[in-house]
Amino acid sequence: MEDPAFIADYSSKSINTPYGNPSSELIVGTITDVPVVIISRHGPGHAINPTNVNYRANISALKEEGCTHILAVTACGSLRERIEPGHFVFPDQFIDRTTKRISTFFDGSDVQHVSMGSPFSSQLRACLVASCNELGFAWHDGGTVVTIEGPRFSTKAESMMFRSWGCDVINMSTVPEVVLAREAEIEYQAIAMSTDYDCWHESEEEVTMEMIYAVMAKNVDNVKKLLEHAVPRIKQNHG
């Protein structure tokens, strides 16, 4: 997603926030005349590991730019047979297994407690599902994503435990991003693309970064097509 060529009239923009610099320059442009902003979560060349991403600066930068909706593309491991590599998943719940990340803007004297019963946007999910149907992409509406600290992958025991908890996919980036977006009052929906079966599947290889990159490279065009199709739908339906 670092190549912004699918965005019209784009330019790059450096920004600083009260929480420091975001992971990358902002790419500002339009998709079908809808203003959009892109941040590369892990920085140019995927140089920032999940623990060290400045999630607060990223969300703060998007808020400062006037963003009202976030579509967060993320690679994920599948914990279910039915979710095959290359499928899109639009989770509606998460389980937080991170341990080292600042997960709130309200860590000073202005303590606030936000509701997280429904952490993802049902409106954005509906638009994404409709776009997938029209584009002919395989998709799964709803499900639970478990976010682990990383950067290592799960042990088989952990993977089996997450399955027993009812988790459907696993990644390293949704939390605290989704929490911070809620605190910033920005509608948020993860676009999770299955790249592998983690390590629980007896007949599949254990996940490697090479495996993830190969599937992502194969399907990056589908991600771009989905964004090009869904963004104007979101604008039309939800302003």
Image: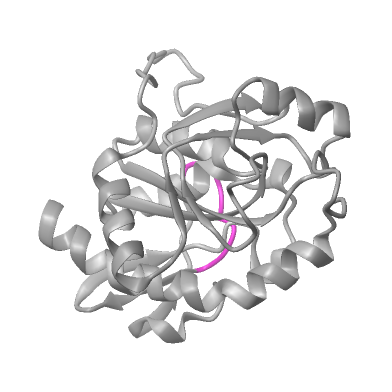
Q: Position of residue 141 (x, y in %)?
A: 40, 44
Q: Is residue 188 left or right of residue 165?
A: left
Q: Is residue 154 left or right of residue 197?
A: right
Q: Is residue 223 left or right of residue 119?
A: right
Q: Say if residue 239 shows up in the picture.
A: no
In front of the other: 31 or 81: 81
The residue drawn where x is 38% and y is 15% is 112
In front of the other: 227 or 78: 78
The residue drawn where x is 82% and y is 43% is 153
In front of the other: 183 or 190: 190
Count the marks: 0
- Tell me, yes or no, whether the highlighted magenta stretch contains residue 5: no
Q: Say if residue 178 shows up in the picture.
A: yes
The residue drawn where x is 46% and y is 37% is 178
Q: Quadrant of residue 214?
A: bottom right
- Tell me the magenta residue range: 18-25
Q: Is residue 131 above or below residue 77?
A: below
Q: Locate the N terminus and report the quarter of the image it occupies.
A: bottom right
Q: Position of residue 138 (x, y in %)?
A: 46, 61
Q: Quadrant of residue 237?
A: bottom left
Q: Main secondary structure of the magenta part?
A: loop
Q: Quadrant of residue 100?
A: top right
Q: Position of residue 24 (x, y in %)?
A: 57, 64
Q: Check the image and tell me how it is coloured.
A: one colour
Q: Is residue 165 above or below residue 80?
A: above
Q: Locate the C terminus and report the quarter of the image it occupies.
A: bottom left
Q: Position of residue 108 (x, y in %)?
A: 49, 18
The residue drawn where x is 70% and y is 26% is 162
In front of the other: 32 or 154: 154
